[in-house]
Amino acid sequence: MNEIYVPVLHFFENGNPFTGSFGPLRFFLKPDAETITAKIWHGVFCMEKSEIEQERQFPLTAEGREELIAWLEEVK
């Protein structure tokens, strides 16, 4: 797999959080009513055992999801 997988918008609209990875990049995505909060770190450990390097919020929209994917591609 050569691209970062992020679930479809409907997944987040239903309030589901998502944890993913790509190589050493790890990320946690948590939606609320209007945004998706993304936290990233690098390494082999879970979020609770790691230092969060960056945190950003994106609109809970199709465009926001695309912005999120582009950002993850940039920081990987």
Image (tube, helix red, strand yellow):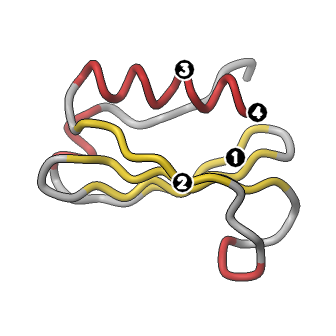
The residue labelled by disc 4 is 76
Q: Distance between the residues labelled 4 and 1?
A: 9 Å
Which residue position is annotated with label 2? 55
Q: What element carries label 3?
A: helix
Give the residue at x 25% y 36%: 59
Decide which of tag 2 and tag 1 comes sooner along the chain: 1
Dot 3 corresponds to which residue?
70
Return the residue at label 1.
Answer: 21
The residue drawn where x is 45% and y is 55% is 18
Q: Mark 3 or mark 1, which is nearer to you?
A: 3
Badge 3 or badge 4: first in the primary sequence: 3
- Which element carries disc 1, helix, strand or loop? strand
Location of residue 19 in the rendering, given as x and y in whole percent from the top left corner? 55, 56
Q: Is residue 20 above or below residue 62?
A: below
Label 3 to label 2: alpha-carbon separation: 14 Å
Label 1: how many Cα within 10 Å (few below 14, some 14–19, many 20+):
some
- Label 4 packing within 10 angstroms: few (<14), some (14-19), many (20+): some
* Labels 2, 4: front one: 2
Give the CA separation, mark 2 to mark 4.
14 Å
The reply to whether the C-beta atoms of the residues labelled 2 and 1 are less than 8 Å apart is no
Q: Which of marks 3 and 1 is nearer the N terminus?
A: 1
Mark toward the viewer: 2 or 1: 2
Amino acid type, mark 3? Ala
The mark lying in front, picked from 4 and 1, is 4
Residue 27 sits above or below residue 4 on the image: below
Gap between marks 2 and 1 measured at Cα: 15 Å
Asked if the residue under mark 4 is in contact with the one under mark 3, i.e. CB atoms within 8 Å, the reply is no
